[in-house]
Amino acid sequence: MMLTWRVALVAVLAVAVLTWHSNAADPFAFFDWDVSYMTASPLGVPQQVIAINKKFPGPVMNVTTNYNVAVNVLNSLDEPLLLTWDGIQMRKNCWQDGVLGTNCPIPPGWNWTYQFQVKDQIGSFFYSPSLNFQRAAGGYGGITVNNRAVILVPFGTPDGDFTLFMGDWYKKNHTDLRKILDDGKDLGVPDGVLINGKGPYQYNTSLVPAGIDYETINVEPGKTYRFRVHNVGISTSLNFRIQGHNLLMVETEGTYTVQQNYTNLDIHVGQSYSFLVTMDQNASSDYYIVASARFVNGSSWDRVTGVGILHYSNSKGKASGPLPDPPNDQFDKTWSMNQARSIRTNTSTGAARPNPQGSFHYGSINVTHVYVLQNLPPVRINGKLRTTLNGISYVPPDTPLRLADLYDKSGVYTSNFPTGPTTRPPTLGSSIINASYKGFMEIVFQNNNTIIQTYHLDGYAFFVVGMDYGVWTENSRGTYNKWDGVSRCTIQVYPGAWTAVMVSLDNVGIWNLRVENLDTWYLGQEVYVKVPDPSGYNVTEMVAPDNILYCGLLKDKQKQQVPHGSLAASSSSVLASSKTLTFMLLLLALMFSP
């Protein structure tokens, strides 16, 4: 009888352990990062950049789908810091999103451990700072999420894997750029484009001074390599190309795409792509890798070109001569849009799971929410230059939205964000979109500005179903791609045009919907989407982490942290593991006690 009672109790406790710590069987990946300033000269002029473990750009986080990731971040900057994980969906766990709607900033000298699972995702993503224009100074790096060995990949194993970070760059510090915007001025033309934190190869002596360090990619003839390319810049769309080589697109932001060859591709701010590139040239010389500014006018933009070198091991000399031509679409404004429309989901293959990507028939689901989000050129509100969505310029409250909900703090935000453009005067506000769990939302981005805007939704991937020039109407739905529209988390909207996406609201939490252009984001072009937990806190949604930071109305709950001279082991993970170990020891004690 005693043994039966113990076995029953052990069984109950074992179920409790497995329920409480369901991810324990999945591997952990630990990262210790020190985020600090360092001096670099990417364009030949010494300036302050943001580095991670003294690296600029930061390290690539290489993990496999379903891994639990713990990133212990020491903030060695002189201002608050948050890191956000573009494209990582944080299932039921917006507490780790790294934006002001869900997290209090990490104060200078403090450390904080992010812990999340890259659940059922594969592909190419990146992380970056989300506060105070810091991404303009660096602090970014890659996230590579690999398939599990049991899941087939729809192409052969590449002979190598390269990550390229490209983006427009200013010689001014991010604090100076911030002040320019605060003073109501435009940032002006960037000073150049960096590739992996380095300036351009001297392809033109009048545009590029001597002595600038440039990126070199070393390859072997006949081999095929995967290039993961991220536009981590401030506001400039870039055209990416490799002289003499085709770019076989295979993936974008976690979705395997229909495999198509491109000679060049427009990559907009915040977007990520994977290409397979075969080294099939004769190597009579090195080849240019180019990232040049798009949709701009004037000779001052000629210098806004990043140039790296593709170097074959049997190359017979340095690259020389003109760069490969950019798209010749000066009089055809639909060329880039048609290129974007050609990017589609490969519905015949699996991604992170064995079932085909196209098995989710998004085109036959009833839409439960429709939002038309219109942006306009910057306007002055209370004497300050601001940007808006549907007439509201978002102002982050001192208390994160999700934290305010947890502690029933009212008045932090409102839930009256308009479903479409309004005629009322533009205002400042902290209004959010109220959605419903398991709903299906259609979002139309209407760009009434004169520059390209790129929109990103944290916590989700959405289906890109349509884009066109003009004003969206309900009749525009007749042009939607309802079968193999690409699923991704960041999409461009051309000036004077619209882009429509559809998203399944299956991830509870409060999630940031923003423009990725840093200047318009900084000036207020964002909103949060609230997807409430229908079963109540700690049922569907993960609980708040033990190391949660407090600020705003809850600042009195925050205990002082002793600044760390060196990075500690991932405290959240250690805590979780120790709790599991305690349970297991209890089980053993019950089994073998007299």
Image (spheres, rainbow, N blue to C red):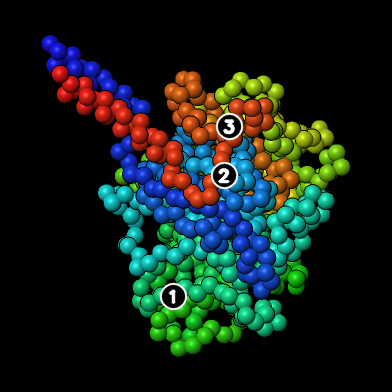
* Residue 15: % across, % down: 28, 24
Please report the residue visible at 34 percent of the width from the left and 56 percent of the height from the top.
154
- Label 3, label 1: how far apart the Cα atoms are: 50 Å
Identify the secondary structure beneath mark 3: loop
Left or right of 349, for residue 206 = right
Displayed quadrant of residue 165: bottom right
Mark 2 = which residue? Answer: 563
447, 17: nearer the viewer: 17
Q: Which mark is residue 218?
A: 1
* Residue 567: % across, % down: 49, 49
Q: Residue furthest right?
A: 383
From this viewpoint, is residue 124 visible?
no
* Residue 591: % across, % down: 18, 23
163, 95: nearer the viewer: 95
- Label 2, label 3: how far apart the Cα atoms are: 12 Å
Please report the residue visible at 71 percent of the width from the left and 37 percent of the height from the top.
394
